[in-house]
């Protein structure tokens, strides 16, 4: 086993320990530690990705050198390493883009607390990505929830605390269901490691025993993770949580936290239950229907919204719906499209949150559309970035959103029964997206004659502007040369099996 | 169905308890009652795990008189899981309680809906 | 290759440069100074772009692939004769309207934004004409909507914003419906490269024939939105009146034609033999004829001049669509000729309307009595262009309508072979009915007209010269139809 195989373990532990270290450091040092850790983890993931691409197969890492079925395991394939790398990129950019707002939003004495939470979040995300053990996954799901909750409420106003409570309640419901499902699965199979569970599940299915408990367990785990990732009827907490927390938190929460759970669900589907077994349950139809409903109702709520950040938050509901629709198709192509959409949505949504804060800053801090009129002239970089993000969301060619829609449609065409429904809903949702995003873009580019607010120039926000440029580049790269990414996703899924 | 249910009454009870806790956490508007619901829910799962791990007539897997045969002991893993789970649920409960205190000092009520209406009135 | 690329990306980059460089609205003292440089700069840009396009049209032979969007979806460009024809229209009409706007936009705010998007739209249109496959086409079709929308809502008023949004909404719906079809074509064709005689696999036709017809119909409707075909035409009369006159000229003369080009491409992909005689053709014919008739009727009843012209566009574009729907070569020739004829005429008419609004501020037809005495040159051009639209020889409109009617009669379709020409004729009468009163009342205001109050209001050269050029072109296409027909014959045979 090469030395590089230690990297997943290193990166989880590094971010976990740096979180602890941050608690005794002054805010400034904590900030530097945080950035360095994210970069280091990103570099390690990139190296790992290259290594895995060259060897062409995944590996399993024994924690403490106990072999299965006793030890705890970490597993790394192309998809895991790629996801970890991507999470690091988005997290770094989100932190950089929101850094200038932090002093205004969080009390000075709590800054290092903030970095602790971010590091903790990163470590739990990495653990969710890499782990091969169901119970470890559950524990890190809870750690993820706690740190995300902390990120929401670190800005102490009434709204965020209420949002944090609501977020906690929904999350706990979700993790309760997940844990119960997991226990039933353990009861059925006698294992906690994903690969061992899968073998036993195959046996159970082949023997035709315990059909109902198996389906109950699958349903419980799926529902739990759906609640946690804010699939449509469970999204009530989302707009407040994303809309009022600090900007970096909002970007990270919308683009990473929910994606971590979704990625865990993908792992469960492939590595625990088995793709074909999962598709034979009716669960995929349920996911499909709720995905479609989310796509429409999320967009409708976004249209009604009069607050730019809540609007972006509601749009997340719709985008999560896209991802679940891809799961619901029950084909490899649908899954690839969903995973691509995870990437593209993460890149776009964090861009939108970061750009929106630039616009509200030059409008006296107000998020109402009436005050945002002409704000793109006052902060040009944010205006351009917001436009680019909107175009990507709408699915204009050359941006990442177009490719994911293309992939979804291509996947839909292959599924006889669900083709029409998904294409029609895709169409409706695209048009609805266009309505509210274009409305906003036009609004911010409508010049006003008298404006009470000051503009801002490049000199005063270098770091911010550079971050935005990186975000736009990321979007365009995903949109123009998507084929390597899609290939990588396919390769990663093949390694899952 | 009937005899099975009777034979596994521990699991059945835990499932019922889980549902009670779940509904409480979901539907109660009082925050403290919600937290109680959360704890009922978690305890139900631990009960389920413990029930699964226990095998009638066997002892806890602690070697006392040099008996090392696995036949004599119950499965220790669920107990380990319960311990881990309790740690998690304690920390989550603590977090929820601290949030509740924050909200109470701000809005002088434990009713989540009431808090929401107050927030709306603030108009922020 | 570089000619094509530069003719596409030069104006796009120039437009972006304008948008970024002159973001802040010009105002006060420096506006007067920089305006002159700005207009001369933009004039130069327009001329260079036009030259590039002409060079590309003359020299470029081979197609090429720019890059791959996904594995099987290349973005590629290729000049064929149909594209060449549309590109000719664009390359004449857009600079003309551009020069016109130098005078027209003098008093509007935020000119640089207008010109930025103007150039952007020019570049995108070139790309649309040169696109080599359906996916490239779709890509620039969307971009065209996005880059032309700011032209519609330029003045920023509430109606303009709503009109812009309406335009966006309709276009996106249409484009999405078309995309829907592209997915199916993608499944059932070997490649999405344009052909004129069907790219469907024979096995797919046998297997999903009925379904493919639905697809074809959805694509027709979808792209028909841009062309203002009947059920989805409502954006046109809303968007045109609020846009600045030169923008509506371009919108009506060229951008709407993008929808026609799209339909030609789609029909080519499916193959005429596949569609001929099916219910798709029948419904399409019905829709086109309804649009022709209804557009003229609405135009006849419309009191506001620009809106009247917009309705007239709705009607005239459906002449073209009718010709395409008949699906024989004569009518196809007629359609392509009408693309040119209508393009020149409608651009000229909108520019005339713009000149009238600019000089007198009058928008309603009823107020324009005696306008011919005040602005004789403009009104002469208006009259000649009107004749072209009605289809009176020796203008281009006559020749194209002749071919259209002839094609329809020769087609041997039941009912439509006669019904078509009849409706075209009725519509031509209506056209005369809604355009000529302007001329008549303009030149002969009647005995009670107050001759004392009238003054010469002829606009400056920057306005009149483009109008005259466009009017002359509309006549020339009629005088020398052989030349145009030659190119079109090449388009038909050389495909």
Image (spheres, coloured by chain):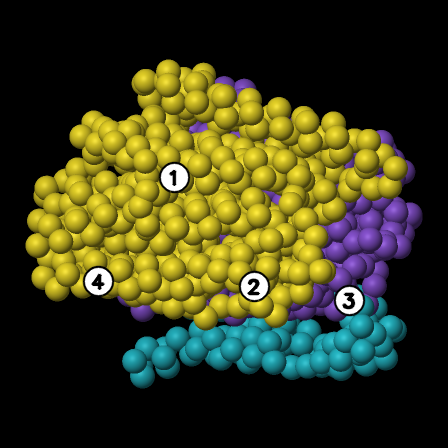
Chain colours: A purple, B cyan, C yellow
Of marks 3 and 4, the one in the foreground: 4
User: Which residue is disc 1 drawn over?
Assistant: C475
* Left or right: where C120 falls relative to A491: right
- Vertical placement of C466 versus A138: above or below? above
- Vertical placement of A52 versus B77: above or below? above
Q: Are marks 4 and 2 in contact (CB under 8 Å)?
A: no
Q: Position of residue A92 (x, y in %)?
A: 69, 36
Of marks 4 and 2, the one in the foreground: 2
Of marks 1 and 4, the one in the foreground: 1
Residue shown at 74%/38% (left/top)?
Answer: C23
Circle nearer the N terminus (2, 1): 2
How packed mark 3 is, by other alpha carbons closer than 10 Å (few <14, some 14-19, many 20 or more), is many
How packed mark 4 is, by other alpha carbons closer than 10 Å (few <14, some 14-19, many 20 or more), is few
| Badge 4: chain ID | C
> Quick one: SS at disc 1?
helix
* Residue A280 in view of the camera: no
| Badge 1: chain ID | C
User: Spatial distance from mark 2 to mark 3, Cα to Cα?
Assistant: 70 Å
User: Spatial distance from mark 4 to mark 2, Cα to Cα?
Assistant: 33 Å
User: Spatial distance from mark 2 to mark 1, Cα to Cα?
Assistant: 27 Å
Residue shown at 76%/80% (left/top)?
Answer: B117
User: Which residue is disc 2 drawn over?
Assistant: C445
Query: What's the mark number on residue A159?
Result: 3
Q: Position of residue A20 (x, y in %)?
A: 77, 41
- Vertical placement of C431 versus A398: above or below? below
């Amino acid at each position: 086993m090469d030395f590089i195989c230690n990297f997943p373990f290193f990166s989880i532990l590094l971010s976990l320990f740096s979180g602890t270290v941050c608690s005794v450091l002054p805010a400034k040092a904590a900030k530097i530690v945080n950035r360095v850790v994210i970069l280091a983890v990103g570099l390690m993931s990139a190296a790992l990705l290259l290594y895995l691409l060259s060897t062409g197969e995944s590996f399993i890492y024994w924690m403490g050198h106990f072999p299965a079925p006793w030890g705890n395991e970490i597993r790394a394939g192309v998809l895991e390493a790629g996801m970890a790398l991507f999470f690091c990129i988005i997290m770094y950019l989100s932190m950089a883009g929101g850094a200038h707002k932090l002093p205004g939003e969080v009390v000075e004495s709590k800054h290092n607390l903030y970095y602790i939470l971010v590091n903790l979040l990163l470590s739990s995300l990495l653990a969710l990505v890499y782990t091969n053990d169901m119970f470890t996954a559950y524990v890190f799901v809870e750690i993820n929830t706690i740190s995300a909750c902390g990120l929401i409420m670190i800005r102490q106003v009434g709204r965020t605390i209420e949002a944090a409570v609501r977020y906690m309640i929904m999350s706990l419901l979700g993790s309760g269901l997940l844990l119960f499902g997991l226990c039933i699965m353990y009861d059925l199979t006698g294992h906690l490691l994903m690969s061992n569970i899968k073998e036993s599940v195959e046996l159970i299915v082949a023997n035709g025993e315990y059909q109902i408990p198996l389906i109950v367990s699958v349903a419980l785990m799926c529902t739990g993770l759906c609640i946690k990732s804010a699939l449509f009827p469970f999204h009530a907490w989302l707009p407040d949580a994303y809309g009022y927390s600090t900007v970096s938190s909002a970007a990270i929460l919308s683009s990473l936290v929910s994606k971590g759970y979704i990625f865990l669900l993908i792992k469960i589907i492939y590595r625990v239950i088995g793709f074909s077994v999962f598709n034979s349950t009716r669960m995929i139809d349920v996911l499909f229907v709720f995905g479609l409903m989310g796509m429409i109702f999320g967009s409708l709520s976004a249209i009604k919204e009069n607050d730019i950040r809540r609007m972006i938050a509601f749009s997340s509901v719709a985008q999560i719906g896209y991802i679940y629709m891809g799961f619901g198709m029950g084909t490899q192509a649908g899954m690839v499209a969903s995973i691509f959409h995870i990437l593209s949505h993460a890149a776009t949504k964090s861009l939108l949150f970061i750009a929106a804060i630039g616009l509200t800053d030059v409008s006296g801090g107000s998020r109402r559309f009436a005050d945002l009129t002409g704000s793109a002239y006052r902060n040009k970089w944010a205006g351009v970035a917001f436009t680019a993000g909107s175009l990507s969301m709408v699915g204009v060619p050359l941006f990442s959103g177009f490719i994911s829609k293309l992939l979804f449609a291509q996947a839909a065409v292959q599924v006889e029964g669900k083709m029409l429904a998904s294409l029609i809903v895709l169409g409706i949702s695209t048009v609805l997206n266009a309505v509210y995003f274009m409305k906003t873009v036009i609004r911010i580019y409508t010049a006003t004659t008298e404006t009470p607010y000051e503009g801002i120039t490049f000199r005063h926000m270098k770091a911010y502007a550079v971050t935005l440029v990186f975000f736009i580049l990321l979007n365009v790269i995903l949109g123009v040369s998507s084929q390597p990414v899609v290939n990588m996703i396919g390769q990663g899924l093949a390694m899952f099996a | 169905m009937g005899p099975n249910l009777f034979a596994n009454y521990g699991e059945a009870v835990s499932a019922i308890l889980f549902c009670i806790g779940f509904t409480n956490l979901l539907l109660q508007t009082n925050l403290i009652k919600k937290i109680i619901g959360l704890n009922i829910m978690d305890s139900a799962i631990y009960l389920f795990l413990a029930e699964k791990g226990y095998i009638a007539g066997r002892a806890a897997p602690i070697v006392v008189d040099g008996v090392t045969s696995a036949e004599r002991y119950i499965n220790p893993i669920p107990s380990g899981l319960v311990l881990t789970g309790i740690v998690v649920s304690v920390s989550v409960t603590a977090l929820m309680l601290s949030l509740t205190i924050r909200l109470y000092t701000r809005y002088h009520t434990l009713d989540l809906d009431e808090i929401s209406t107050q927030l709306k009135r603030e108009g922020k | 290759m570089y000619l094509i690329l530069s003719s596409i990306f030069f104006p796009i980059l120039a437009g972006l440069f304008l948008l970024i460089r002159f973001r802040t609205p010009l105002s006060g003292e420096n506006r007067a100074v920089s305006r002159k440089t700005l207009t001369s700069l933009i004039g130069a840009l327009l001329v260079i772009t036009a030259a590039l396009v002409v060079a590309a049209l003359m020299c470029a032979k081979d197609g090429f692939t720019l890059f791959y969007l996904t594995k099987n979806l290349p973005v590629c460009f290729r000049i064929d004769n149909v594209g060449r024809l549309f590109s000719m229209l664009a390359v004449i009409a857009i600079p003309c309207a551009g020069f016109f706007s130098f005078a027209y936009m003098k008093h509007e705010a935020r000119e640089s934004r207008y010109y930025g998007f103007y150039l952007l739209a020019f570049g995108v249109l070139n790309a649309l004409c040169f696109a080599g496959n359906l996916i490239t086409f779709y890509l620039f079709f969307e971009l065209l909507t996005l880059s032309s929308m700011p032209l519609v809502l330029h003045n920023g008023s509430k109606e303009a914003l709503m009109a812009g949004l309406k335009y966006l909404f309709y276009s996106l719906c249409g484009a999405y419906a078309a995309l829907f079809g592209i997915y199916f074509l993608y499944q059932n064709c070997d490649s999405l490269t344009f052909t004129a005689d069907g790219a469907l696999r024979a096995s797919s036709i046998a297997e999903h024939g009925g379904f493919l017809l639905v697809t074809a119909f959805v694509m027709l409707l979808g792209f028909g939105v841009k062309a203002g075909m009947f059920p989805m035409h409502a954006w046109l009369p809303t968007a045109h009146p609020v846009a600045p006159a030169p923008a509506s000229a371009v919108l009506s003369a060229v951008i709407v034609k993008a929808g026609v080009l799209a339909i030609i491409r789609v029909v080519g992909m499916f193959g005429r033999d596949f569609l001929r005689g099916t219910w798709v053709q029948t419904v399409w014919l019905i829709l086109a004829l309804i649009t022709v008739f209804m557009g003229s009727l609405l135009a006849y009843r419309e009191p506001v001049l620009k809106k009247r012209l917009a309705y007239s566009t709705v009607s005239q574009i459906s002449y073209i669509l009718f010709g395409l729907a008949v699906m024989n070569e004569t009518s196809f020739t007629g359609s392509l000729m009408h693309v040119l004829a209508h393009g020149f005429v409608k651009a000229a008419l909108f520019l005339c309307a713009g000149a009238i609004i600019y000089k007198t501020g009058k928008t309603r037809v009823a107020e324009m009595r005696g306008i011919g005495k005040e602005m004789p040159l403009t009104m002469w051009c208006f009259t000649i262009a009107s004749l072209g639209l009605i289809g009176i020889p020796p203008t281009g409109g006559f020749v194209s309508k002749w071919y259209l009617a002839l094609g329809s009669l020769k087609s041997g379709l039941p009912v439509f072979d006669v019904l078509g020409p009849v409706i075209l004729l009725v519509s031509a009468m209506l056209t005369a009915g809604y355009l000529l009163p302007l001329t008549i009342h303009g030149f002969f205001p009647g005995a009670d007209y107050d001759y004392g109050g009238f003054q010469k209001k002829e606009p400056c050269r920057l306005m009149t010269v483009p109008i005259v050029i466009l009017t002359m072109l509309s006549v020339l296409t009629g005088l020398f139809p052989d030349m145009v027909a030659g190119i079109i014959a090449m388009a038909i045979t050389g495909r």
